[in-house]
Image: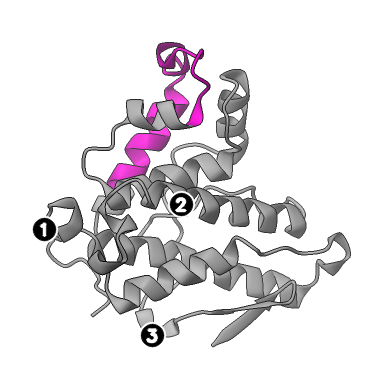
Amino acid sequence: MGQRVAGRQFKVRRSLGWGIIIPMTAATYDEFQQVLHDARALQEPAEAHGTLAGALCSSRDYGIIEWLHEILPDDSPEGEALQSSVLQNVYDSMVRTLAGNEADFAPLLPDDEAPLAERAEALSAWCQGFLYGLGSGPASDPAKVSTEAGEIIHDFTEITHVGVDADEQNEENETAFAEVVEFVRVGVQLLFVELAPARGEEPAPGAASLH
C-alpha cells in the first residue's frame, strides 16, 4: 500500500504482520531536547536518536560513550552529559527495545500535539540520523544486506526528503504520516534482526524476520 506525504509516496508493508503497538519510551522528546541543548549537542533530538538506532543495528560494540562522541562537540565532556539520567535512559531503552521480542521500539519524535510539519521534519531527521549510524558498521557494505533489507534502507532514504506544508495538516496527511512512522518503527526492528550476523550475533529466538 502506498501512502503520500507532501507529494512523496512510500510503501507501507502491511504484510509484516505487526499491528500498531504502544511503544516503551525512556524519556519524552522535550526532556531529551533539553538535555541535548544544555550539552550543546551537534544534532537535534530526532537525528541523535536515529543515529543511536542505526549504529546499534550495525555494531554490537556501540556504547553510550561512542554515541556521545558522535552527537556532542569535541570540547563537551561526556561525563557532564551523563550526569543527567536522560541520556543513559535513552541509550538503555534503545538497547532493550531493539534486542527484546516485545516489538515496542519507536523513534523518538515530537508528540502528537506538535504541528504535523514539525513532526514530519523530525521524522526526516530521524531517518537521516539512522542512515548515518547504520553506515558506521558492516551494514554499510551493500553485499552484506539482503534485497529486502536494502529496500527498507532505500525507503528510509526516501523518507529523509519528507515534508509537509504548514497548511496541509488534515486527517488524510495525519493518517499517512502515522503509517510512515509505523513503517519506520517496524523496519528498524526487522533490520536489527536481519543485520545480526553482520554484527557477529545470532538473532534472538522468536525474533521477527524479513524472510
- Residue 178: image quadrant is bottom right
What residue is pinned by disc 2?
130
The residue drawn where x is 44% and y is 83% is 14
What residue is pinned by disc 1?
202
The residue drawn where x is 41% and y is 75% is 151
Q: Residues within 10 Å of mark 2 (few under 14, many from 20)?
A: many
Q: Could you tell me the amino acid type at mark 1?
A: Glu
**Residue 16 vs residue 33: left or right?**
left
Q: Which mark is residue 15?
A: 3
Task: Kindly report the distance in space between the C-alpha atoms of the residues bearing marks 3 and 2.
Answer: 23 Å
Q: Could you tell me the amino acid type at mark 2?
A: Phe
Front: mark 3 or 2: 2
- Residue 166: image quadrant is bottom right
| Residue 20 in view, yes or no | no
Mark 1 or 2, nearer chain start? 2
Q: Which residues are magenta?
A: 71-96
Please count the marks in the image. Answer: 3
Q: Could you tell me the amino acid type at mark 3?
A: Ser
Mark 3 vs 2: CB contact within 8 A: no
The residue drawn where x is 38% and y is 51% is 135
Task: Kindly report the distance in space between the C-alpha atoms of the residues bearing marks 1 and 2.
Answer: 22 Å
Mark 3 or 2, nearer chain start? 3
Q: Residues within 10 Å of mark 1 (few under 14, many from 20)?
A: few
Vertical order, 126 against 52 (above or below): below
Q: Quadrant of the C terminus?
A: bottom left
- Residue 190: image quadrant is bottom left
| Residue 38 in view, yes or no | yes
Q: Nearer the viewer, residue 140 or 11?
A: 140
Q: Secondary structure at mark 1?
A: loop
Q: Nearer the viewer, residue 27 or 56?
A: 56
